Image: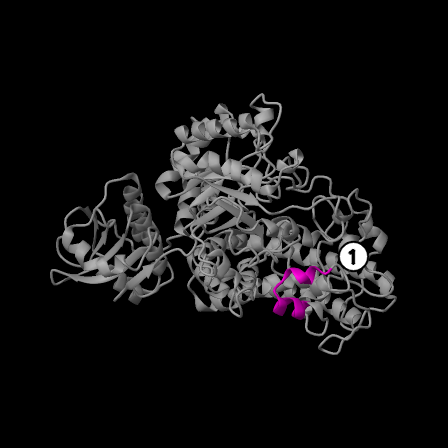
Amino acid sequence: MTSVRFVILFLSIFFSASAQKDYRLWLQYDRINNSVIASEYKSNIQGIISFGNSQTSQIAVKELQDAIAGMLGNKLEIRSEIKGENNLIIGSQNSLNSDLKKALQPDFDKINNEGFIIKSILFKNKKQLIISGKNEIAVLYGVFNFLSLIQTNKSIKNLNITDSPKINLRVLNHWDNLDRTVERGYAGFSLWNWQKLPDFIDQRYVDYARANASIGINGTVLNNVNANALILTPQYLEKAAALASVFRPYGIKVYLTARFSAPIEIGNLKTADPKDPEVMNWWKNKAAEIYKRIPDFGGFLVKANSEGQPGPQNYGRNHVDGANMLADAVAPFGGVIMWRAFVYSEHDANDRAKQAYAEFQPYDGKFKENVIVQVKNGAIDFQPREPFHPLFGAMPKTPLMMEFQITQEYLGFSTHLVFLPKLFQEVLESDTYQKGKGSTIAKVIDGTLYQNKLTGIAGVANIGNDLNWTGHSFLQANWYGFGRLAWNPYLDSETIADEWLRCTFSNEENFIKPVKKIMIESREAVVNYMTPLGLHHIMDTGHHYGPGPWVSNLSRPEWNPTYYHKADKNGIGFDRSKSGTNAVSQYAPEIEKLFDNPATCPEQDLLWFHHVSWDYKLKNGQTLWNGLSLKYQEGVNQVAAMQNVWNQSEKYVDSERFNEVKMLLEIQHKETKWWRDACLLYFQQFSGKELPAGVEKPTQTLEYFKSLKFPFAPGNG
């Protein structure tokens, strides 16, 4: 009996320690195996000098102590006076002594309020390392950056780093409901336990804030854009204030989504008309109430007059009226309004892709200065690939905030390994040509193209209460990558993948090189096996899980996949050219000309902009039908190759994470075949052509695939 207990105890310790690795995200702080590198670090870091005593400063010191103890095996003494050499000195500009301040002044001149300095210096003829910034949150960012250098085995000799975020608002949007379900969430329930708040503070809240601070995220929207007005009641504001207190030392502001009809639902008013004086006053009082509880409250995110949500148009008003009314309410406290441009109407089924531009572009320059319009990366809805949204570059007098979706609503949920920073980078590098060549979207959202002072980027979070946070170990990289690109939208996704792998798993080159390759290729793979050559929105209805190109019976035309692919005997694709809906006219002339002609339109966007025949010749000489079929097969093959690479990585990864990823890749590979077979069988009805050589034959019928139902698919809130 004793031996059985011992085995059970041993296994529980082993598995909990192993699982803990997944919980620690990219902040593993494992012992460094390279003795040469470890020796360099130890010789350059022999003590920690801290010039701060705030909560944030204490967090930074503890992070350094714990990380260095984990990676180097020694617990460093903390002092407040500089003695000896090879110390690591940390402190904000105001807390440093005058000599240090003077020595670093040229570096302080290079950074903004959130920027940091990491520098090797000679101070009184003794070598020291210093981490500083204009405030203590900036110092904390510098500490995390410094520790990532050690994690990735970079040399810390002769450091001279100054770095600042290029975007002001770097925000996660949680589509979390008050009942803890998460719309489009695939990693368990919401982190926020509203029932136990405000008195019970889960350690997970602290760990969430720490993870976000490590990548420079400085804001979180706690609740779903499909908002519940109860979040603005005193009962829930008290709970939100408790979360804000946890997040504040990590530099993270709390935002809430505001339901436009809240004055009626919780305020006992008869209207929510933004021009009504009582409504204006109600929102001003509500803002004052919130700021009394949460002095650094960030402001409101608003989804209005979209997909049934109430808004100013209910009262014959427009988006400017609604946004500016709320902007006036939060302006005295320094708050902002993030007003979403995701709108489309059942009364205008001409082309859903055109509607946001048509509704918002005419209002350029009419929003208050503390309003930022939040625009999805593409004009439809977070597809595996979309051409960039035409609003970017088309509103020079209005700050635009990028909205990416980190959660994989249309990309296989959390069972599919898809490295989204590759998608994000593609969008950010897209050239709008609005001020000539080089007018990239990165320059639009960081304010440099039009000199906007208010800048922002949002990511719809993929985080839940699963032990590993994101439902799949590799999808942690999408959270990490979003944060890195929010800080610097010019980073390369391959650099991000390399950083994340080294921090999360191993610095072994034989592991890094092949696994990084499959990460970089994974996004193109999912496009190939789901929506190649510009197909879009052909997922099954409601839950968006799996293929459903046949769906045509929904009440609104633009909810049906058949609306988007328009397959018939003559061909396939949505004609957005001048001879079609003329959506191309919403782009700058150079881009309009490129997209309008099938011969010049990038083939990755061909069926987005053109309805072309099944016999249309692609650039590789294949007919469209053959090329489409081969793309589906290529996606299947790519995931099989991903499996092979992962299976060879076993010796570099702990058994729990290795086996979890292995099983998930098996599911993904199985589902790639489902996508290929279901889509090609459906489209084959119209093309009337045989599958080309190299494409595996389906083992089920189209009727079988149509019969599949998923009534309890996750995230279908």
- Secondary structure under tag 1 reads helix
Question: Is 587 on the left-hand or right-hand side of 205?
Answer: right
Q: Is residue 533 part of the magenta span, yes or no?
A: no
| Dominant SS type (magenta) | helix
Nearest the viewer among 537 and 345 is 345
Q: Residue at x 68, y 54 (%)?
A: 354
Nearest the viewer among 441 and 408 is 441
Segment colored magenta: 582-595
**In which quadrant will I find the C terminus?**
top right
Tell me where residue 412 appears, x and y as whole percent: 65, 52
Determine which residue is flagged by label 1: 678
Tell me where residue 683 appears, x and y as whole percent: 82, 61
When asked about the image quadrant of residue 120, the answer is bottom left
Query: Can residue 633 be seen?
Result: yes
Question: Is 642 on the left-hand or right-hand side of 72?
Answer: right
Tag 1: amino acid: Ala
Query: Can residue 195 be seen?
Result: no
Question: Is 533 on the left-hand or right-hand side of 216?
Answer: right
Nearest the viewer among 151 and 555 is 555
Q: In this figure, which colouring scheme has been used for the structure?
A: one colour
Disc 1 crowd, CA 10 A, few/some/many (<14, 14-19, 20+): many
Tell me where residue 318 appears, x and y as whole percent: 62, 41
